[in-house]
């Protein structure tokens, strides 16, 4: 490695020692996002946006395959609509950006820039849905929402963020609940199979549920600082919004009934988790299935520059048919500088080709995960590269999974939980009576909150606060 | 055709007699869009949004193939930034929706909900661009913008609309101008080859150019009411925004220079043109290349329902591999009702299959353009359907092209222009001295404005207002 390269890398703080500074440095230096002149709002740069496009493409295909369609609803929600569901407005009003003027005119009614769209979508459902034949409605939109934040962090918490929001309406409770679970499973696959982030799947406690929901399903990931991060949610809204907005249908039995509705979302916050989960002291780490560039080819020209370049181009053409490939043939940078830049930007594989490789029909393949180098034959290199991409994908997931398991413990007393939160954080599995008072007491004492109640696990042991037999198993953690 | 079917169609006004009511009825009945509780803002329903997704998919591929990348910039523009380019703020300020409060707090500075994003993007370019090596920057975003409108119309003019906005920066004037033309040609292909809407291509007059541009390229289509509609624009911004926001670079010659920038857009307004251009008294007409459903298969069950359904499913499977196909097997509607519904929704081809067709290995293919019916063999039906889709695509373009040509005339006097505008509207080709005073005089006298100056046509005749030799050829029309 060249000295020049070392200098490049030295500019990032250490991930283990200065996690927060490391995070910001990687986001900026890998050109994923930047600060904007608007307080709390970020600019998503092309390389970061390509990650979001990858997430969109993957989800869009699954949503469509499960019968969902895209639509678009207005950016604005009249204040009177936002107020129709009491819990909902209470939850969101403090964070709303308000439009008060159109041109020079003061508006008769303030408009909320949507913090979420239930209050503008459900009134349309009231208009569109008449009969059981009109159900289910399975609809989502890709857009941005605004929630005025006091303190912000690129991707993780910004006053505006991108997401999709699904909004469905069903004839029965069971169907609506089933819809929540279908979506939850799609999210789990996205997190684990694509982003290589293992998650705990289950329900949120009542204090952590969505404002206006009966219950909320969640996916919780563990970040390297051993704090939990909510990676996606799917809300069972019961008939709360249907009643607030009068969404009724005539059922097969000729009775008029309120629909059961759901809503669900993942956002650009996911990109924050991705950065935190897989990066290291050399920069960003990207699992191949989401990496915008999976293989970067760096020619090392030497004396026989033209022949090397021609060979590199041929490899790029061939590999471009099976993977996302970038040939970095810029002549103003040295190979060492490029190695470091592409490590910083998280390209899963690097293929180096120099004069000796050209002569021997070989190339050098380097894995981003561990820097492992192998000389590989140009013959059949497509298969070699595809296999290496799968390997890197598995390595990222395997490491993250081992980390999650190593930082998940059980507790039988509140002291054990408090100690875990003080010393090593992570998830702590224990019993809970599901009473609000006990949740509050534990939060106060330990700083931990109940992140997720697994769906199918039987209750274990006793509640850490009151000592009564638990009615649920729960994972506690400190959270983002 | 069943009586029930006739009733369904009768509900739409006639296109030729009540164009405006016809338009609204088609948008609502084909479920493309709906009015929302927010004044001037529409809801784009799934079928209408599928048209937008088709446009996005087609453009996204071409933009990427020509080196462009997607990104995302904040929804908000601080008022002080909007004011930095004088013409720009003057053009947009009267239509801006202003955010004045975040939660309960009044903001120190008002934020514009973006009417367009030059004023939030160029400051970032000032930060990102240092050297000629950083150029060109070829970037766009897909989002929504808000321009407060007094009178609105679904798709054609709404206070919020969806679009993409491209923003590029270049080292030279020539490169920036060339970029405008590359984009203009992509737009022309979208309009003519995909949406089957013929356009006049050229420059806008100075009064009609974008606020802050040196010049604007445009595509102008002629709608069935013989008024012109601007279908897309590409703006050469010169160094105006670069100077306002300090976007400089160090060139190869070591001199610091301002970049040359462009911006360009098409919006959901295009969907309005599409509806107007190809619909008829039976409803929407969709060229196959943009139709979300290209072939609808309607089984006519008769006595041998199960066999017919099985054959229809087999055809749907086979055709689904080569086209976008929908099998309408709903049992609560009659075939006649379905025929009418899918004509209303503009499906280019309908395939009917009944017991006799099953017996003879045939099906009946019906074209939406002219209702032409043909009995076709199930053997090789993929090729038959693909050929018919091409034919329908050509028919739509051919009709629209013939209409445009039939309604484009020349004028040598202002009286001829005035008479044309009074009697039959359409485009009027004539000479122009390019003086503002003459443009104003003609607008006042005839109601027509200069829509487009063709790029390569030599000036013809004399200016209709002042009689001096023309310096440009121009097409006048009344416009949306």
Image (cartoon, coloured by chain):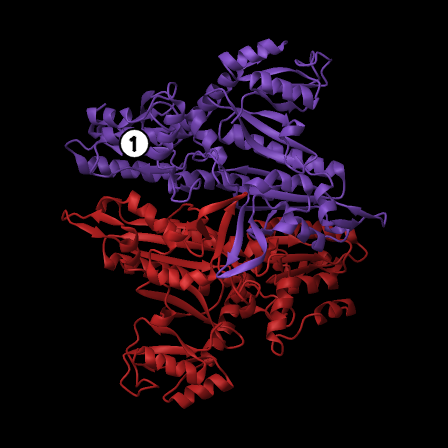
Chain colours: A red, B purple
Q: Position of residue A209 (x, y in %)?
A: 36, 67
Q: Position of residue B36 (x, y in %)?
A: 39, 43
Q: Position of residue A6 (x, y in %)?
A: 74, 70
- The quadrant holding residue B62 is top right
Q: Quadrant of the N terminus of chain A?
A: bottom right
- The quadrant holding residue B470 is top right
For the residue carrying disc 1, how many other residues have a C-alpha within 10 Å: few (<14), some (14-19), or many (20+)? some
Relative to A237, B430 lies left or right: right
| SS under mark 1 | helix
Indicate whether B236 appears above or below A193: above
Indicate whether B138 appears above or below A189: above
Residue at image mark 1: B341
Q: Position of residue B26 (x, y in %)?
A: 36, 30
Q: In front: B262, or B300?
A: B262
Host chain of mark 1: B
Indicate whether A310 appears above or below B441: below
Q: How many marks?
A: 1
| Residue A5 visible in the shown view | yes
Q: In front: A439, or B253?
A: A439
Indicate whether B407 appears above or below A277: above
Relative to A295, B9 lies left or right: left
- The quadrant holding residue A276 is bottom right
Q: Residue at x 45, y 53 (%)?
A: A112
| Residue B121 visible in the shown view | no
């Amino acid at each position: 490695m060249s000295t020049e390269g070392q200098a490049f890398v030295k500019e990032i703080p250490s991930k283990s020692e200065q996690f927060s500074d490391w995070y910001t440095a990687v986001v900026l230096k890998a050109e994923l996002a930047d600060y904007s002149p608007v307080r709390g709002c970020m600019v998503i740069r092309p390389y970061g946006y390509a990650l979001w496009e990858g997430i969109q493409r993957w989800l869009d295909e699954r949503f469509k395959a499960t019968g969902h369609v895209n639509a678009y609803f207005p950016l604005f929600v009249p204040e009177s609509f936002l107020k129709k569901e009491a819990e909902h407005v209470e939850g969101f009003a403090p964070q709303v950006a308000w439009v008060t003027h159109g041109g020079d005119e003061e508006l008769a009614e303030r408009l909320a820039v949507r913090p979420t769209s239930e209050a503008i979508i459900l009134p349309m459902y009231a208009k569109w849905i008449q009969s059981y034949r009109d159900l289910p409605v399975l609809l989502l939109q890709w857009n941005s929402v605004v929630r005025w934040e006091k303190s912000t962090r690129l991707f993780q918490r910004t006053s505006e963020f991108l997401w999709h929001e699904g909004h469905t309406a069903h004839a029965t409770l069971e169907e609506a609940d089933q819809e929540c679970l279908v979506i939850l499973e799609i999210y789990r696959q996205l997190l684990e199979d694509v982003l290589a982030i293992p998650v705990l799947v289950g329900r949120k406690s009542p204090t952590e549920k969505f404002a206006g929901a009966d219950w909320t399903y969640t996916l919780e990931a563990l970040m390297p600082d051993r704090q939990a991060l909510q990676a996606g949610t799917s809300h069972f809204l019961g008939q709360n919004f249907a009643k607030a907005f009068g969404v009724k249908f005539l059922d097969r039995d000729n009775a008029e009934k309120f629909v059961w509705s759901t809503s669900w979302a993942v956002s650009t916050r996911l990109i924050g988790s991705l950065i935190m989960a897989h990066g290291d002291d050399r920069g960003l780490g990207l699992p191949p299935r989401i990496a915008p560039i999976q293989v970067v080819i760096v020619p090392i020209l030497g004396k026989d520059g033209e022949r090397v370049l021609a060979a590199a181009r041929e490899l790029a053409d061939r590999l471009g048919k099976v993977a996302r490939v970038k040939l970095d043939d810029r002549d103003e940078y040295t190979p060492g500088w490029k190695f470091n830049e592409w490590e910083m930007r998280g390209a899963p594989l690097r293929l180096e080709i120099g004069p000796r490789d050209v002569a021997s029909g070989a190339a050098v393949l380097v894995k981003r995960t561990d820097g492992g180098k192998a000389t590989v034959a140009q013959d059949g290199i497509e298969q070699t590269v595809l296999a290496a991409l799968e390997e890197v994908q598995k390595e990222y997931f395997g490491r993250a999974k081992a980390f999650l398991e190593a930082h998940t413990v059980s507790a039988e007393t509140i002291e054990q939980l408090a100690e875990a939160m003080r010393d090593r954080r992570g998830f702590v599995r224990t019993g809970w009576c599901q009473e609000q008072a006990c949740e509050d007491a534990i939060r106060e004492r330990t700083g931990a909150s109940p992140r997720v109640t697994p769906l199918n696990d039987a209750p274990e042991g006793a509640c850490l606060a009151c000592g009564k037999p638990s009615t649920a198993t729960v994972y506690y953690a400190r959270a983002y």
